[in-house]
Image: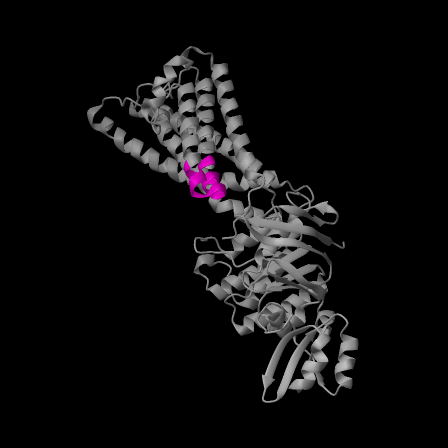
Amino acid sequence: MNTKVDVRDVSLNYRKMNVIDQVSFTMETGKTYGLIGRNGAGKTTLLSLLTGFRLPDAGDIQVNGEPLFENRMMMPKVNLIYPADYADESDNAKSYFETAEKYRPHFDRAYAEELAEKFGFPVKKPINKLSTGMQSAFNATLGLAARTEVTLFDEVYNGMDAPTREAFYQEFVREQERHPRIMVLSTHLVSEMDYLFDHVFMLHNQKLIADAPTDELQSRAFTVTGGQALVDEVTKQMAVIHEEELGGMKRAVIYDANNDVKQKEAAEAGLGIGAVTLQDLFIYLTGGGNGHE
Amino acid sequence: MSDGFSAVKSITSDLFKIQMKWTLSFFSVVLVVFLLLDASWFFTRQAPDVTLAAFIFEPSKIYMLVIGIVPWFAYFTYFISHGVTRKDYFAGTAISAALLAVGLMGLTFAVSGLIHMIEPITGYAPIGTEQSLALISSHPAAQLTGTMIVLFLYYLAGWIVAIGFYRFHISGGFASIAIVIILLSITDAIWAQGNVIVIDWFRHIQPLIDTAALPFTVLVGLSLILAGAALTALWLSTRRTPVKMG
């Protein structure tokens, strides 16, 4: 069954600070959403709202047209996987699998055990005795094997070594093909994970500043390179989000929904045109660049 | 998870099993202490002046207060993370607490019965075997009912402290302790109990209401009203509480 999540004008305040500000978007089954933002942008808070861990101060979150918060039918469909503190957790992964099997409608125990073997963590060892990387692999296993209609991974890779991260990404893709669902990957390791995203939500200063399919978002940005004076002249009326100068040369990054026309203008003026990676776009849009807009 | 799955039943069962394991450990320790204290009987042949049921009652109150605190911190986030609603978690906790009070008293009476059974063999005969608990009614069923209600209220008191600190931080935690002192004072006053936690201030008010003169059903009714008030306060604090992602 297809699942749809609607987030409408959601805001949240915490100790008189606005931590989520009028965020709206929708999500649909079969798509992987990248939730990207700098530290403190509100990613984890937004995910906690999407899981019903918190009630927004304004706006509403619906799953298949029904309010999510405290909804007995909907809450088991949503699963947030986050780097939990297991310092006092003496239970083992096996016992967690048993609980998940009981409370999660589609939890696949055999698959969970297969993943444990693949990621290389013991299921009978107390979780607080596992390394941070193994705890993260255990978390990832719970998320993948629960097969909830909405699966949210918050910085799930913490502590995982490169081979385990790669194994997780591969399994993630396979699982999305076999059991399509709404998957959200919250991260600031954009360059490593961007190929997994069908769609990007970019949070900055508690607001959603980008909500678009990954290709479309990237196609809104391009670089122009050429002599400094010419670049300045051509980009005068464009939305420049980043600039670099070296000798007499200048490179500017343009971010504009109407980029076809702008690119054509720049190319006709004799400037070199280039693409922008999602990671660079993220850096420039969230204040890491030195654009003049 | 089957189609007929009930989260409340499942939470109740899970929490009851976990807490009953703790309770068995607690009971074993108290039983050993009781037996050690009574070991003098084998040497003096003088009957001990307290039964197991009476001996365990005061420690049980403290025990229920403490385990009322623990599950919230250990299991609230855990179960909500598994897609359980606050309402179901709340109901499961309340029911399992009531069952725990029944279980603890059932265990006490079962072991007391065993001790009673071996009496002809050993000659062991503690005074007051028939008046197992120091409650106002002499009827065993009434004593049992009253005891379970008191233990349940002590569990709720622990739960109030837990949610006070969890939801309302340090200041709320201390406020919840004040509320609990009042709750337990009233509980002990209703059942004419010596108060093990509360300072003596309540004894000045207690004589104004002579609970000993009230019928048993009224005492039960008053206790249930108190439990209802505590549960209402707990639910109001729980229903929108943010889940801490620790």
Q: Is B48 inside the magenta-drawn segment?
A: no
**Considering depth in this image, is B246 or A39 the residue closer to the camera?**
A39
Q: Residue furthest top?
A: B213
Rendered location of residue B92, percent (x, y): 56, 37
Whether A292 is drawn above or below A232: the answer is above
Whether A196 is drawn above or below A127: the answer is below
Rendered location of residue A271, percent (x, y): 72, 86
Q: Quadrant of residue B133?
A: top left
Q: Residue at x 51, y 71 (%)?
A: A161
Q: How is the image coloured?
A: one colour
Would residue A222 be seen by someone viewing this image from the given angle?
no
**Considering depth in this image, is B219 or A125 the residue closer to the camera?**
B219
**Considering depth in this image, is A41 or B69 the residue closer to the camera?**
A41
Q: How many marks?
A: 0
Rendered location of residue A86, percent (x, y): 47, 56
Whether A120 is drawn above or below B96: the answer is below
**Considering depth in this image, is A288 or A8 the residue closer to the camera?**
A288
Rendered location of residue B200, percent (x, y): 32, 23
> Where does the magenta region start and end?
B160-174
Would residue B128 be seen by someone viewing this image from the given angle?
yes
Q: Is B165 inside the magenta-drawn segment?
A: yes
Q: Residue at x 41, y 34 (%)?
A: B177
Position of the N terminus of chain A by quadrant: bottom right
User: Is most of the magenta stretch helix, strand or loop?
Assistant: helix
Position of the C terminus of chain A by quadrant: bottom right
Q: Quadrant of residue A79?
A: bottom right
